[in-house]
Amino acid sequence: MKERFDIAVVGSGFAGSLMAMIAKQLGLRVILLERGRHPRVVIGESSTPLSNLLLEELADHYNLPHIRSLSKWGSWQQHHPELACGLKRGFSFFHHHTGCAGPVDREHQLLVAASPHDAIADTHWYRADFDAYLVSEAQGMGVTYRDEVELQQFIEEEGEAVLTGKRRGHEIGIRASFVVDATGPRGFLHRTLGLGEHSLPGMPSTEALYSYFTGVKGIEETGGVMLEGEPPYRPDDAAVHHVIGGGWVWVLKFSNAVTSAGIAAASALATQLRLSQCESGWERLLDSIPVLREQFRDAKPLQPFRHISKLSFRSASITGRRWALLPSAAGFIDPLLSTGFPLTLLGVTRIADILEKHWGTEEFGRELHGYAVRTDAELLATSRLIGALYANFGNFPVFSAISLLYFAAASYSEAARRLGKPQLAASFLLHDHPVFGPASAHVLEQALTAGDETNSKAVIEAIYRVIEPIDVAGLRNQARRNWYPADAKDLYDAAHKLGASRWEIAQMLERCGFNAAISLPM
């Protein structure tokens, strides 16, 4: 291949394809390169309200209507029922003591609703379908696409980048003015350019083991959860987290009867379970948690287990003169709390804005540097949060309270953006908010050593004080006993925190479909 392009995007996961489509809409010549072939299954599947809002904003701004319909469960089912996905009404956490056979009682549950009804709910993306669809859309828009490309070198010469490698046994060379790397942690440019790694504050060394299954029961079917009254949503219609000392297990159900499940664990637990032995490691995990054993009693893996020996990652460099890593390639913390999607979509939004406003100008390099600084700062903020959660897997009251820092920041950010006030929430986790940012960082440092009951209580009380100015979801209401619904009254009561009137809140709720469900196909 001797053709020259403005933009070469390496990696055709959802972010790479979306980036390629946006660049094409901006009038640039774009090539999208993929090492494998679609369809292929990858982890990174659970969306969030902020993720879906960012997807909506990108689709609206860059005229991508077929992408916008994938931002909610309801519109997805109306327009693309052929693409498998899972219903995600919120985040479900169940805390287990190793070997304990009884059901998980209310004191060891955390249910946080992300939507009031199914129509505007979030989704789990079955990436085999989702990514293949986005690649097809990109090609339909005129993006040049090449799969089975094994890139070997990145060279800068004569004012452009040259990518060389092989495709199906033939040598290829691709010239582009700029390269966007969407190949994930320790991906193409990180390896090729030897970018190095930096540490992540507060994060332990972690491993992961996962596969895809059929025949997985819901936790309610097993009798493994004690429900007192009416929960804010069906606990299985969520990103389900089973929390244990030293790690956590995810269970995500899709509409095609497939379930994604795996464990992320600190080194001590990973060694104890011998996760590197894959299937036998999984069996040891199930044996240690009777509720999980019952959930997976009839389950069958659809593919070999995959073990990741080093999960977290932070690249020492994020941009260069003729290249940039998307956040998904710049770093990865952990699947916990589904932070990867909003981080990545914020990065796509920022690079798209740079291409739109500064392509071919002297400001382009300066803007890229700013993008790198923001991306790294958000990775660090995420690392502090997830690291504190890891430190408190065995202390569920503190773990639950720390989680509220995330849910408070996420719900405030979503509300601010939906009100047309993005300046109130310019950064992920509000880490650069003049009050919440430093206060959150301080309390997370305290939480790393919460320890005994007295210190734990002090940390929890401090967290409630920290989130008060941005709590628009009633997260400090202890009468809810860790079951948090999506309640419009909470937003009305907190309107002043967003500099909004009750009328503006009402208009926002009407626009986003909060109050009225739509009819879905059976």
Image (cartoon, rainbow, N blue to C red):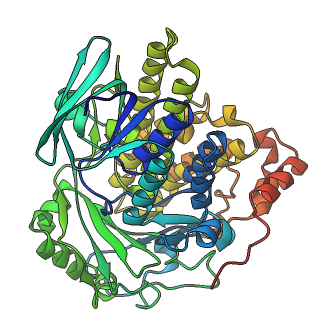
Among all residues in the image, which is located at the extreme top?
362
Quadrant that contains the N terminus: top left
- Relative to 386, is 308 on the left or the right? left
State the count of labels: 0
Instruction: Evaluate whether residue 439 shows in this view.
Output: no
Where is residue 512 drawn, in percent x and y?
74, 57
In the rendered view, would you say 68 is above or below 74?
A: above
Q: Which residue is at a point 41% across and 57% down the rendered structure image? A: 131
Where is residue 202 drawn, in percent x and y?
32, 41
Among all residues in the image, which is located at the extreme front?
2
Where is residue 147 drawn, in percent x and y?
27, 49
Quadrant in the rendering for residue 165:
top left
- Relative to 81, is 133 on the left or the right? left
Among all residues in the image, which is located at the extreme right?
503
Where is residue 74 drawn, in percent x and y?
64, 69
- Relative to 462, is 283 on the left or the right? left
Looking at the image, which is closer to me, 234 or 287? 234
Quadrant that contains the C terminus: bottom right
Q: Which residue is at a point 23% across and 37% down the rendered structure image? A: 188
In the rendered view, would you say 257 is above or below 28?
A: below
Quadrant in the rendering for residue 219:
bottom left
Looking at the image, which is closer to me, 372 or 274? 372
Instruction: Evaluate whether residue 55 shows in this view.
Output: yes
